Image (spheres, grey):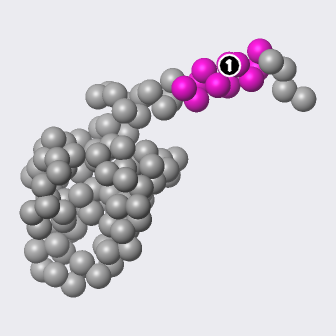
Amino acid sequence: MITEIEYKKAMQTIEAYNEQIFTQSGPIYDTLKYACNQLGTTIAEVQSKGRQRNLVYNRCLIANYLYSHCYDLTLQKIGKLINRDHTSIIHYLKSHKNLLYYTDYKIKNDSLYGND
């Protein structure tokens, strides 16, 4: 049986972790920044509402990268990082395989995953 003190401490740890995800420091933000740098874009561009092909490709690749490298991130948290709904993240993850048939998308994918 867990005590009330242990429960409060666990909840504080969880809250601190959740706050760290959305601040500009920590491993998750660093992963997002790395992915943006590899793709030649900025976090602001990825979080924008633009629908240009290049931006959509970058969002799709970043969503896939975060999903495959940050195992403890939920779809909602990935969506919040790139200013999208969790259903958009699901769509990006499903679209990734089909988009690899496009040369320009494949080149971006290889530049992102090439150093892994």
Percent position of residue 71, x then y: 49, 52
Quarter-wise, where is residue 101 in the image?
Answer: bottom left
Does residue 31 sit above or below 22 in this rendering?
Answer: below
Q: Of residues 68 and 45, which is closer to you in this image? A: 45
Q: Is residue 7 left or right of residue 49?
A: right
Compared across the picture, whether 90 is left or right of 34 comes to right
Q: Looking at the picture, how far across and down is residue 32, in whole percent?
A: 28, 45
Q: Is residue 44 visible to the viewer in this orientation of the structure?
A: yes
Residue 52 is inside the magenta segment: no
Q: Is residue 111 visible?
A: no
Q: Is residue 73 left or right of residue 14?
A: left
Judge whether 111 appears above or below 2 on screen.
Answer: below
Badge 1 crowding class, 10 Å Cα cut-off, few under 14, some 14 to 19, many 20 or more, is: few
Q: Residue furthest right?
A: 1
- Residue at position x 58%, y 29% from top? 14
In this picture, is 18 found above or below 96? above
Residue drawn at x 45%, y 49% is 76
Q: At numbered mark 1, what does the secondary structure look like: helix, strand or loop?
A: helix
Give the x, y percent position of residue 86: 41, 55
Give the residue number, with chain letter if any, for mark 1. Answer: 9
The quarter of the picture where the N terminus appears is: top right
Q: Residue at x 17, y 47 (%)?
A: 48
* Extent of the magenta region: 5-15
Q: Give the total number of marks visible in the rendering.
A: 1
Kind of residue indicated by mark 1: Lys
Q: Is residue 14 magenta?
A: yes
Give whichever of 37, 6 is nearer the camera.
Answer: 6
Which of these two is toward me, 39 or 53? Answer: 53
**Outermost residue to the bottom:** 101
Q: Where does the image place residue 91, in percent across and percent down from the top left?
A: 36, 68
